[in-house]
Each structure stands twice: as structure tokens, then as C-alpha cells.
Amino acid sequence: MEKLQQEVAEIAQGRSMIVEEDLEKMHYLKAVIKESLRLHIPVPLLIPRVALEEVKLMGYDIPKGTQIIVNAWAIGRDPTLWEEPEEFKPERFLKNKFSYKGLHFEWLPFGAGRRACPGMHFGVAIIELAVANIVYKYDLGIPNAGTHEELDMSEQCGVMLQKKTPLLVTTSPRF
Ligand code: HEM
């Protein structure tokens, strides 16, 4: 959190708001959001597909017409693809330049191919702008002097992934 606040504050240079033009310089912010979308992917099973023809995939015979569900949640936490997959480490996205366009099949927050999310750039811009402004203006804490290890991060799966228990945070203005 401190590293993120430091980056945002350096780029804001005392202005009252972060604006869209600032975002392209906020590399750590982008990495934090990408890592959040890896560990807590909002649409965990993407949108189901149907095989248009018979294919052999990794030793499996998939008949024409089979419904295919891609478990992007599991792919994002696969230890054969990610080092320490359960750890929140934004730095991994500083080293590897992953784009949102669905070209990296180990990380698919917006899906891939012709049915990939058409709102991805709009969605990312809104998240970046909101998160940047929140951490710029507020220090966030856990109620009752709790620690982040005590946070219940369990999830419940549906079309959208949600936290089982709501996330409660305290806010204190930074200036
Ligand atoms: C963080 C925000 C968002 C996330 C994580 C997200 C994620 C996704 C995912 C995973 C898919 C399925 C892609 C696939 O199966 O390959 C999808 C589809 C879709 N999304 Fe988003 N989305 C977001 C924001 C938005 C926004 C802001 C819009 C519209 C303004 C939007 C409109 C759509 C539409 C229309 C589809 C269906 C596309 C199709 O079936 O051809 N999404 N989204």
C-alpha cells in the first residue's frame, strides 16, 4: 500500500485529483490491479463456448458441439504457471508485460478471442482512476485495529465471483 501511495503521490505532485493522463505513468498501480484481477478474477468461468468441430486437446478428444467452460480462476492460481500463486505480488506484472487483450492464456480477466470483453479498456480505466484517487486521498485500514492476515478472503462462486464476507475498511484523509 505504501509503495502504491508513494507512486501516486509523486505523480500527482500535490494536485487535488488524479486525472486520466496521469495513469500511463503509474506502472505500480497497473501492476497492483493486474495482480488483483489474477487472484480475484471477477468472472471466474468466462462465458461458455461450444466446440464447432471435433478437436484433440492435450490428449482429450472433444466432440463437435461440446460445451467448454474455461476455469480462468484456477488457471490464474495454477502453480505450474505462477510462482507462489497464492501470494499477492504485483511485481510479477512489472517484469512481464501482460496486455489485457487475451493473448496470455495464463491470465484471462477479460477472456480471449472474439467473445472477449468489449468493455475491458473502459473497465480498466475506471478501476485505475478510482483506485488511484482513493489511495491518494485516504489511508485505508482494517476496523478494530485488525491485521490483513485476519481478513477473511474466502470467495463464493457464481457467474461473478464475490467475497463471502463484505470487505470493511476504515478511511482517514491524507491531506
Ligand atoms: C473489471 C471490469 C470487467 C471485467 C473483469 C469483465 C470481464 C468479462 C469477461 C471475463 C467476459 C467474458 C469473456 C470471454 O468469455 O472470453 C466479459 C464479457 C462481456 N463484457 Fe465484460 N468485464 C468488465 C467490464 C465490462 C464493461 C465496463 C462492459 C461494458 C461497458 C462489459 C461488457 C461485456 C460484454 C457485452 C460481454 C459479452 C461479450 C460477448 O459475449 O461477445 N464488460 N466481460
Image (cartoon, grey):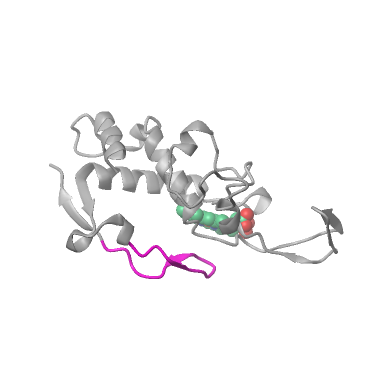
Q: Residue at x 37, y 39 (%)?
A: 29
Exactly how many numbered labels are in the figure?
A: 0
Is residue 123 in the magenta section? no
Residue 130: percent from left, percent from top: 32, 48
Residue 6 is drawn in which quadrant?
A: top left
Residue 151: percent from left, percent from top: 32, 62
Look at the image and tell me whether residue 69 can be seen.
Answer: yes
Residue 126: percent from left, percent from top: 39, 48
Q: Quadrant of the C terminus?
A: top left
Q: Quadrant of ligand 1?
A: bottom right
Q: Residue at x 49, y 44 (%)?
A: 121
Residue 162: percent from left, percent from top: 44, 66
Furthest-left residue in this view: 175
Q: Nearer the viewer, residue 12 or 79?
A: 79
Q: Nearer the viewer, residue 163 or 173?
A: 163
Is residue 158 in the magenta section? yes
Q: Which residues are magenta?
A: 151-168
Q: Residue at x 44, y 50 (%)?
A: 36
Look at the image and tell me whether residue 18 can be seen.
Answer: no
Q: Nearer the viewer, residue 125 or 146?
A: 146
Q: Tell me: residue 112, above or below residue 30.
A: below
Residue 57 appears left or right of 12: right
Q: Quadrant of the N terminus?
A: top left
Residue 7 appears left or right of 90: left
Residue 13 appears left or right of 153: left
Residue 135 appears left or right of 80: left
Q: Tell me: residue 154, above or below residue 132.
A: below
Q: Main secondary structure of the magenta part?
A: loop
Residue 69 is drawn in which quadrant?
A: bottom right
